[in-house]
Image (tube, grey):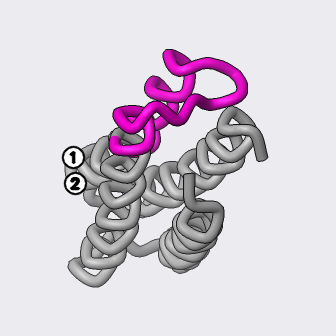
Amino acid sequence: MLDALTLVTGVAALLLALWCGWAAFRDQPTKDWHFIGMAVVLLLALVQLVIGIVALARGDRPAQGTTIFAAYLLGAFACIPAAGFMSLAERTRWGSVTAAAGGIVLAVLEVRLYDIWGG
């Protein structure tokens, strides 16, 4: 898989987490700009999902198993939308905390994806 894309997605997720964490620190809910940031990170995760599926279809195999890689790949793609929907349900500072937590979780999943692929 593309190491650069994994790195960019992980860094973007951490930046999103910092941004939403800063909003939570200032006692603010998630705003439209935060959701635009989530959309950008989600787009990166979507590109990674497509590249991962294409790599598996071409016959490339992850070092630690195809099933676990596919599960982490789908989890990484679903992480930000889940956090975004939960932050919509909670329109207080805790919505921002939820979005920040989603960014941190995605960054950890990116590290794990890199590990599983054989990095």
Among the 4 quarters of the image, the one containing residue 96: bottom left
Under circle 2, the secondary element is: helix
> Label 2: which residue?
88
Q: Residue at x 58, y 76 (%)?
A: 15
> Label 1: which residue?
89
Q: Is residue 108 magenta?
A: no
Judging depth in this view, the residue of 67 and 54 nearest the camera is 54
Q: In this orientation, does residue 73 appear?
A: yes
**Does 51 sit left or right of 2 as displayed?**
left
Under circle 1, the secondary element is: helix
Task: Answer above or below: position of 43 versus 33.
Answer: above
Among the 4 quarters of the image, the one containing residue 107: bottom right
Residue 65 image offset from top left, x and y in percent? 62, 18
Residue 117 image offset from top left, x and y in percent? 66, 38
Q: Residue at x 46, y 31 (%)?
A: 59
CA neighbours of label 1 inside 10 A, class few (<14), some (14 to 19), many (20+): few
Q: Amino acid at mark 2?
A: Leu
- How far is mark 1 from mark 2, CA to CA? 4 Å
Chain part drawn in magenta: 54-77
The single residue placed furthest to the bottom in the displayed view is 33
